[in-house]
Amino acid sequence: MKIRKAVIPVAGLGTRFLPATKTVPKELLPIVDIPSIQYVVQEAVEAGIQEIIFVTGRGKDAIEDHFDEAPELEQILADRGHKEMVAMLRRIAEMTEVVSVRQKKPLGLGHAVLCARDLVGDEPFAVMLADDLIDAETPCIRQLVDIFTETQESVIALLEVPLEEVNQYGVIKGKELKSGLYQIEATVEKPAAKDAPSRMAIIGRYVLRPEIFAILQNLPAGRGGEIQLTDGLSRLVQERKIFGCEFLGDRYDIGDKFGFVRATVAYALKRPDLKDKVAEYLKILNR
Ligand code: G1P
């Protein structure tokens, strides 16, 4: 079966980025001039995904508006002769189908995914976390979709992290089948370094079989009193295989302030209109 839908949880309050996020959803904070969520949606589109399901919360309507038509704005820009800007806005509005569902209470990532159950239906789907920005030649979610296409089993993105950082991630126990491809045996959410089964961390890209929903439905609260997707995976792996993909690409944790700055600099250095100026400025700062 094909992966047609991606669930993107965006209900989080973004408290780490207050006061910016007092009125602006953190997913719309721009990496230079492009809201970070647009990169994530673009990644899904490039993997052939046709429908984005946002799991939203109060005050997050502007995210959907970003992917909607903006006729008044387009008209004003057209009157002023800004054809390219109009075309750019049209591309964003036509990029993909967007639907949304509310997560009324902050009960965790597993619960957020469960909220999308009716919209996903009985088919495999992607989950993409907007705090993980991944710059890759082959979009990260496409790398996972390719493994799913071959195996028809769930696939999660993996990254080796330093031991002192394992407590910030879901961590796997598994065996490497071939370079970069793992078979998952268990997953544990944010273990202490001494308890971590490995240094292979789960990054926010998943392709999941629909069996995960029944598991999440009956899952007790885990770490932090929240329903954890990682705990759901640990149960799913007892029913069906899950593969881990050590993806190729650079990942930025933009839920973290320094990660956000790193992403901003790295993305600016890739832009033809900015790279020379930014590179020159970094040199001056270094002197
Ligand atoms: C979530 C997941 C965690 C995963 C991480 C990836 O944690 O619960 O398993 O490793 O995303 O970014 P969060 O960063 O939302 O606390």
Image (cartoon, rainbow, N blue to C red):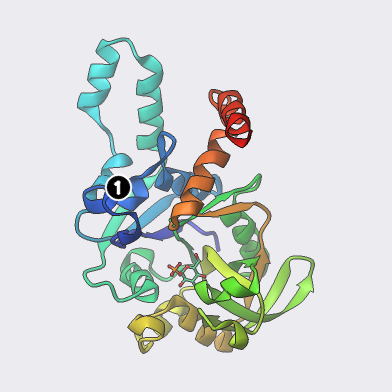
At x 40% / y 59%, what residue is drawn? Answer: 8
Q: Residues within 10 Å of mark 1 (few under 14, many from 20)?
A: many
Q: Residue furthest front?
A: 287
At x 47% / y 83%, what residue is drawn? Answer: 231
Image location (x, y in percent) of residue 213 = 40, 78
Against 104, residue 143 (above or below) is: above
Against 168, residue 94 (above or below) is: above
Q: In the picture, which quadrant includes the N terminus?
A: bottom right
The quarter of the picture where residue 77 lies is top left
**206 left or right of 5?**
right
Image location (x, y in percent) of residue 15 = 30, 60
**15 left or right of 32?**
left
Q: In the picture, which quadrant includes the C terminus?
A: top right
Q: Which residue is mark 1?
A: 63
Q: Amino acid at mark 1?
A: Ile
Please say whether residue 155 is visible from this viewpoint. Answer: no
Seen from the viewer's position, the closer of residues 48 and 113 is 113
Image location (x, y in percent) of residue 261 = 48, 46
Please say whether residue 253 is visible from this viewpoint. Answer: yes
Image location (x, y in percent) of residue 9 = 37, 62
At x 36% / y 29%, what residue is drawn? Answer: 90
Against 103, residue 254 (above or below) is: above
Q: Residue furthest right?
A: 178
At x 59% / y 28%, what residue is drawn? Answer: 275
**238 left or right of 27?**
right
Seen from the viewer's position, the closer of residues 204 and 2 is 204
